[in-house]
């Protein structure tokens, strides 16, 4: 096994013929790289790949790069994609908008072997791409669907009774089923280490039925989930257990929903890229909360085991752990919101969208400003946030129920 590390992405080459192919490619790739460097004053071409095994990485990384390039079109990016992609529809759309070829892999490799290749490299990210400059907010070049794709999805929606113009909400409540069952990850990773992010869809039924009773279609998203959504409401679709699941539906629905409600999981990045409003609920670690889009954020409760006191925002930022065991070791209990709290958060988010010009109370504005101020003062701000969307906020209901949260 030969290991190459480049730009933060580790690529493992197992096949015995890989080295031979790479050496043979040098015959055409090296002259091509040199020629591309020579024409840089005329056209600036970069080579790179995208992490494609997880939908959140796949969507956010390309979406951000596409937005950046639409603003600053002085560069042209060429891509190669790994054989394994988490969503075929997203791959198809990428190929429609930029140049993608397996040959770019060799150009990318030899570009980095030759001195001075960093300028022409567009490396992938190991962690989720963060929009720290506000490129997505400033971009007016969406990654478009074809008319036939639009027609296909709307036909599926109409089969449930949906009509053109009807509002719909996508709901994604993370549980352990997908990563533990997916053939992409099965037997290679034990994802129980972040069980602190999992939740129970049953706690959301009251909120989803409230939306449906107000004429809003609700689509429970997800490919593989532990439990069905136990409701008979005609406007609630349990897509996670539908035989009609498709990569196209996964992308289009999140890209076009009136609101995305999510506990924080990869597919919700589609809504972020397409600038749809998102209610992040039961979200931790709160240090990583997404503020670069129109997001309403309601954290999961963290409580000190010994005192039973709720952690403040500042303590959330200091104790932003990535594993369940770390919270236990820090004597912090992770407590999911109950059904009533979720209902209140959803009501707040929906009413905010219905009346976008609603004037906030002076005390609420003061609290929102204090929330942003604490976030901005944290040492991680420039690397994780950088840009804050003008409509990004923390749940007012949460602050009213937990007034100590903003204490310093």
Image (cartoon, rainbow, N blue to C red):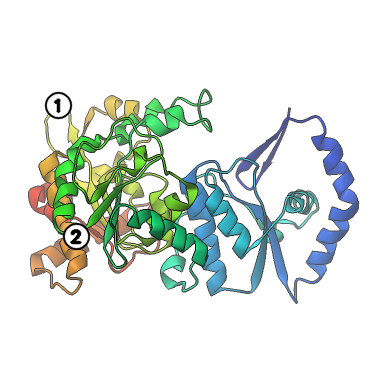
Q: Quadrant of residue 176?
A: top left
Q: Is residue 276 visible?
A: yes
Q: CA distance from mark 1 to mark 2?
A: 36 Å
Q: Report the residue at 46% width, 67% height from top.
A: 135
| Residue 145 visible in rendering | no
Going from N to C along the chain, the mark reached first, 1 or 2, is: 1
Give the number of the mark in front: 1 or 2. Answer: 2
Read off the residue under disc 2. Answer: 350
Q: Nearer the viewer, residue 315 or 126?
A: 126
| Quadrant position of the N terminus in the picture | top right
Q: Residue furthest top?
A: 187
On screen, 386 above or below 345? below
Residue 132's x, y, as percent? 44, 61
Quadrant of residue 215 within the rendered picture? bottom left
Q: Residues within 10 Å of mark 2 (few under 14, many from 20)?
A: some
Tag 1 secondary structure: loop
Locate residue 64, reporting x and y percent. Answer: 50, 60
Q: Which residue is mark 1?
A: 306
User: Is disc 1 surrounded by few (<14), some (14 to 19) or many (20+) residues within 10 Å?
Assistant: few
Q: Residue at 38% of width from left, 64% of height from top?
A: 275
Image position of 207 (left or right of 296): left
Q: How many marks?
A: 2
Seen at 66% across and 54% down, the residue is: 48
Residue in front for this viewpoint, 181 or 275? 181
């Amino acid at each position: 096994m030969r290991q190459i590390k480049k730009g933060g992405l580790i690529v493992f080459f197992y096949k015995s013929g890989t080295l031979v192919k790479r050496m043979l490619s040098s015959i055409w790739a090296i002259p091509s790289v040199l020629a591309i460097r020579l024409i840089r004053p005329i056209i600036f071409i970069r080579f790179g790949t995208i992490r494609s095994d997880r939908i959140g990485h796949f969507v956010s990384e390309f979406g951000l790069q596409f937005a950046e390039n639409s603003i600053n079109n002085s560069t042209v990016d060429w891509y190669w994609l790994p054989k394994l992609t988490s969503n075929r529809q997203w791959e198809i759309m990428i190929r429609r908008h930029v140049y993608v070829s397996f040959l770019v892999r060799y150009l990318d490799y030899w570009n980095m072997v030759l001195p001075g290749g960093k300028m022409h490299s567009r490396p992938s990210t190991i962690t989720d791409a963060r929009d720290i400059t506000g490129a997505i907010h400033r971009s007016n070049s969406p990654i478009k669907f074809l008319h036939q794709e639009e027609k296909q999805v709307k036909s599926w929606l109409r089969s449930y009774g949906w009509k053109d113009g009807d509002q719909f909400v996508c709901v994604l409540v993370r549980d352990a089923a997908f990563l533990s069952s997916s053939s992409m990850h099965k037997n290679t990773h034990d994802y129980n280490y972040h069980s602190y992010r999992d939740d129970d869809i049953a706690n959301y039924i009251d909120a989803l039925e409230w939306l449906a009773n107000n004429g809003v279609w609700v689509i429970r998203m997800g490919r593989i989930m532990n439990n069905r959504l136990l409701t008979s409401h005609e406007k609630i679709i349990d897509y996670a257990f539908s035989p009609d699941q498709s990569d196209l539906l996964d992308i289009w629905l999140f890209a076009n929903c009136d609101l995305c409600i999510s506990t924080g999981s990869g597919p919700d990045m589609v809504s972020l890229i397409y600038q749809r409003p998102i209610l992040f609920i039961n979200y931790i670690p709160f240090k990583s909360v997404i503020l670069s889009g129109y997001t309403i954020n309601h954290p999961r409760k963290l409580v000190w085991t010994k005192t039973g006191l709720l952690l403040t925002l500042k303590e959330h930022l200091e104790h932003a752990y990535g594993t369940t065991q770390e919270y236990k070791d820090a004597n912090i209990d992770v407590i999911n919101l109950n059904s009533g709290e979720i209902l209140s958060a959803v009501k707040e988010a929906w009413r905010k969208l219905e009346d976008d010009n609603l004037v906030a109370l002076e005390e609420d504005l003061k609290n929102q400003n204090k929330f942003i101020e604490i976030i901005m003062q944290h040492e991680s701000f420039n690397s994780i946030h950088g840009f804050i969307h003008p409509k990004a906020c923390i749940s007012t209901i949460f602050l009213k129920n937990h007034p100590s949260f903003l204490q310093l």
